[in-house]
Image: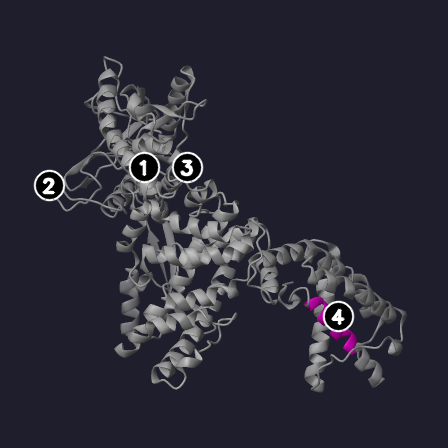
Amino acid sequence: MPDLLIELFSEEIPARMQTRAANDLKKLVTDGMVEAGLTYASAAAFSTPRRLTLTIDGTLDASPTTVEERKGPKADAPEKAIEGFLRGAGLTRGDLEERETPKGTILFAKITKPGRPAADIVAEVLENAIRNFPWPKSMRWGTGSLKWVRPLHSILAILAAEDGATVVPMDVDGITSSDTTEGHRFMAPGRFSVTSFDDYSTKLKRAHVVLDATERRDAIWHDATNQAFALGLEVVEDNGLLAEVAGLVEWPVVLMGQIDEDFLGLPPEVLQTSMREHQKFFSVRNPKTQRIERFITVANRETADNGATILAGNQKVLSARLADAKFFWENDLRVAKSDMNVWLQSLENVTFHNKLGTQAELVNRMAALARELAPAVGADPDMAERAARLAKADLASEMVYEFPELQGLMGRYYVEASGENAAIAAAAEEHYAPLGPSDDVPTAPVSVAVSLAEKIDKLCGFWAIDEKPTGSKDPFALRRAALGVIRLLVINNIQLSLLDIVPVKTVTSALDPHMQSYDRQVNELVEKVQLLSKSLDKDGIGASINVALVGDQDALNVQDLAGDLATLAMTRGLDLLSFIHDRLKVYLKDQGIRHDIIDACIAMDGNDDINLLVKRATALNDALQTDDGKNLIQGFKRANNILSQAETADGVEYSYGADVKFAETGEERALFAALDMSEPTIKTAMATQDFTTAMSAMASLRSPIDAFFEATQINAENDTVRRNRLNLLSRIRTLCSSVADLTKIEG
């Protein structure tokens, strides 16, 4: 069984595309081979800046001969129908077999497909893969029609067996397959032939090419950390940069350079970002001072002067880059220390969203909301409002304009330089967090208030203008914002009723787009409507109208518009809450809580308090992990089903209270006693939001309920006893349903 080796050799492939391209090549070729009947034992793909390589072990010499049986028309079918069947099968009338079936005499054809040599199949599959390769971007060159990410130079394709290797013959736009490849562009120019994958990888290593990207990454990190350790320093870990640099070189040579003393005073994050983004350098830090003092660069070749010339050139370019960063830093510090209002005013000319206003308007909304949220999170309202006003100021700075990824971080530096409180400065950096499911969550009260304000305003605003995520598309990262709100509330143990905030915020955000559907004359009433929107009641359902406006035609128009806005706000506010609940399900699912348990808790009142909702779901989940909890669900469902059927049949609701004096069995009286004992505990626990105690007390009802059903017939002959027992079931349903909607629990 031969082994297949393929190499597609080209000009430099962008580092970000290499791993995906190697996997795509593997999938396209192996899928095509299997579809053609050519199986294999194993496959592996590799990539370097100049080549995609695929090795497939244990392929068949040829695809097997197959026999396909195809059912045709009846033997007495019209001649044209039989002729059509013969044409499709490629047979003659004499090749068909007649068989008796329950539906009559049917014609059957046996179509034999002879096997094909492996080389023919591989050539066909590989050419199709090359011509239809899914590059994110590709180009044409010369006069051919072939498109590739960069000009494709050669195709190596061989089948290696014990008796030697044979070239898979193929030609793609004049590029003929062969058994040769090239080594390093500078250190080992020229082509050489190979006979197998082992021979190929060995000769490449001699030609200064490390084929395996993982091996290149490990070599870079090993050499970099060793050089830093020798000087008492450490390399700042950056896995993304490490993977990218490994895709830029075929023969990694690690060099360490110095940073000019003039630039060591820059914030370490500025140095690290500038070197990473512009030069692809690793930062080397002094662990004692946390200063970035040196850099690591990775060359693609060895030199006679051990990289001295390369380092000199890199240091010269780096100094020019860092001179720009230093200029931005010093200019920004002057502004921060003198008057940050300059930046705040400039945000009036920066659009946040064409339907949601400028960044300055966003800041105003955040400041108002942060002040409102401050008491709930334990923050000082004045500090929360001030922090929100300064949180976005660095967006107007020169440093953030040059390095947008430093937003927030530079804000902390600049707010600190302006003399503001440290908590306000921290909020400037932390209000963007959490950015992902594993990102740290702010815990400082001021930071929490501003972070919540930023995310809630974003969600309300985009819901107001009906720009919600659809499918996999979420251009404004609203799913991330919703998850951020959830994690902020849960991790900081914050009780907050979102429906006290969301509808009012949605009215404010919806005001401008909603106005567009009205005649131009209504635009004169904007100011009045804005005032009215502030007077929405707690649930966002109605609006109060200034009595001074009653009787004024304008006031009537305003009243109609305010009512429309209130209805719109509540509708979209509830829709937004449903969206947050969906994200909560994802969040809790990762913690092992089933979706039906979450649904059972969402169905209860107060489901807009995310923190309490999580506590309820966690307590219910824990209760259902016990045998008592699992069996109680069955008992509850049995009681609920019997009661619901009886209420439907009798046309009455059995909820008027059961009396123990009508009990006839010991088990029945024991259930009354158990309910009398558990009910106060559950009510008290629910009132104090002690869900764990409530769930435990509910689970303790399992045994008396089971015993009651085993010993008692609900539909007794005595109608009074029957009604009493149905009312007892109603008491079970009511008490258990006060904890969670157990009808939604599956199983």
Question: Is 82 located above or below residue 339 in the figure?
Answer: below
Quarter residue 104 falls in: bottom left
Task: Evaluate if marks 4 and 3 touch, with contact meaning CB atoms under 8 Å apart.
Answer: no
Numbered label attached to residue 732: 4
Query: Judging from the image, what secondary structure is the residue with disc 2 in?
Result: loop
Q: Nearer the viewer, mark 1 or mark 4?
A: 1
- Residue 3 picture location, percent across and down: 35, 33
Which of the image's four quarters has the C terminus?
A: bottom right
User: How much space separates mark 4 and mark 3, taking CA atoms?
Assistant: 61 Å
Alpha carbon distance from label 1 to label 4: 68 Å
- Between 45 and 299, the one lying in front of the other is 299
The alpha-carbon separation of the residues under discs 2 and 1 comes to 53 Å
Q: Amino acid at mark 4?
A: Ile
Circle 4 residues within 10 Å: few <14, some 14–19, many ≥20 = many
In the image, what residue type sits under mark 2?
Gly
Tell me the residue at 84%/73% (across/down): 712
Mark nearest the camera among 4 and 3 is 4
Who's the residue at 44% across and 69% down the image?
534
Residue 225's tag is: none
Mark toward the viewer: 1 or 3: 1
Q: Are marks 1 and 4 in contact (CB under 8 Å)?
A: no
Identify which residue, 379 or 540, lies in the foreground.
Answer: 379
User: Mark 3 is on which residue type?
Assistant: Ser
Separation of residues labelled 2 and 4 (CA atoms): 82 Å
Question: Would you call the spot at circle 3 few (<14 residues within 10 Å), some (14-19), or many (20 or more)?
Answer: few
Boundaries of the magenta span? 726-737
Q: Predominant secondary structure in magenta? A: helix
Residue 681 x %, y %: 77, 62
Name the residue nearer the viewer: 466 or 78.
466
Amino acid type at mark 1: Leu
Mark earlier in primary sequence (3, 2):
3
